[in-house]
Amino acid sequence: MENNSVSTSLKLFIVLSRAYKAINEHVNKVIHANGLNPTEFAVLELLYHKGDQPMQQIGGKILLASGSITYVVDKLEQKGLLKRIACPKDRRVTYAQITDEGKKFIQDIFPEHAQQIDKLMSSLSGEEKLQAIELLKKLGIPAGKF
Amino acid sequence: MENNSVSTSLKLFIVLSRAYKAINEHVNKVIHANGLNPTEFAVLELLYHKGDQPMQQIGGKILLASGSITYVVDKLEQKGLLKRIACPKDRRVTYAQITDEGKKFIQDIFPEHAQQIDKLMSSLSGEEKLQAIELLKKLGIPAGKF
DNA sequence: TATAATAATTTTGAAATCGAGATAATTTAA
DNA sequence: TTAAATTATCTCGATTTCAAAATTATTATA
């Protein structure tokens, strides 16, 4: 049974992918219906919940290449949902800052977003969700080692 | 605590996304190093493990728009890893079939692929993996309801 | 049997993402 | 202090994906 661990891992990989994609598909629909794509939403939500961010850090947090950040921030700036702020201490750095309009947008959208996710996860009990969180935490972190 | 369920679900959504992306990032690197992109690999693996598939079904199984299937199948056909077979019973339908070269490719790649996934998941014990599989199964399936 | 509705695939144009290189600013080291 | 290395952002070209429309084939209906 040396093979057993590998096939269990493969199975886990498959159900992980399915679960992620299935849930995301629905979440993305709501975001899209509100005129943003998932990446734009992720950036805006980051700024809303975590405050101003240097462009570069955005890339690290939502896993996006530097060229893509410029693109997404452009889009959001064109829509008036964020603005660029030059850093006074380091002129290489530009901060992205959510605008009042952006805040209003997130405030309008977020409750629906959160509730939809809750609905999509209603097949698990509260206890099961906590179990899943613990297991997935373990799974997510150590991948950096390889 | 009416809010508690929602915030637990949000947390689960976040760790699910992180785990998926973290693992996928590494898996994709190996695939890429072998000259395919993740979508091409998914199509080829599907054909290898499940046999010939009508174009349309491929889209359903790996969650891809019809136009994208044409594109990916073109790519794989150009690389000699699959071929199109006209359906004799319904001339609207085209089957994608893996070639011998394609089979050889998967046979070469798959063990490394599987072992890498096993490594990436080594932070969980066998028992934990089985738990995670059960929980994620529950999570993945019912999303179709919404 | 025609006609209309449905279905499968392809085509097309636009959007999103990446990676590599360019530019500009800062820091380190000689 | 100058030169080299590093860092942050942006630009550009290529790839991948989608959505909508076009094409071709089949099935259902009048």
Image (cartoon, coloured by chain):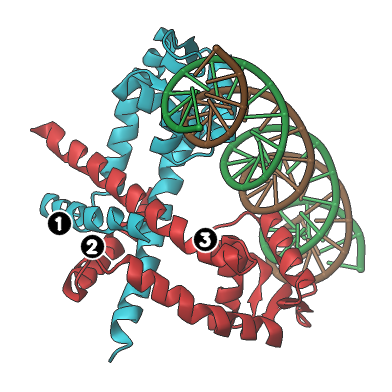
Chain colours: A cyan, B red, C green, D brown
Q: Is residue B10 left or right of residue B113?
A: left
From the image, state whether disc 2 or disc 1 is nearer to you. Answer: 1
- Viewer-proximal residue, D9 or B136? D9
Res A131 label: 1
**Quadrant location of the N terminus of chain A in the rendered image:** bottom left
Q: CA distance from mark 2 to mark 3?
A: 27 Å
- Residue shown at 57%/83% (left/top)? B108
Q: CA distance from mark 1 to mark 3?
A: 30 Å
Q: Which class describes the residues within 10 Å of circle 2: few (<14), some (14-19), or many (20+)? A: many
Residue at which label 3 appears: B29
From the image, state whether disc 1 or disc 3 is nearer to you. Answer: 3
Q: What's the chain of the residue with tag 1?
A: A
Q: Is residue B126 above or below residue B7?
A: below
Check whether the beta carbons of the residues at disc 2 and disc 1 lie within 8 A of each other: yes
Residue C21 rendering spot, x and y as whole percentages: 71, 38
Residue A63 rendering spot, x and y as whole percentages: 45, 41
- Residue shown at 42%/37% (left/top)? A60
Residue at which label 2 appears: B135
Q: Secondary structure at mark 1?
A: helix
Q: What's the chain of the residue with tag 3?
A: B
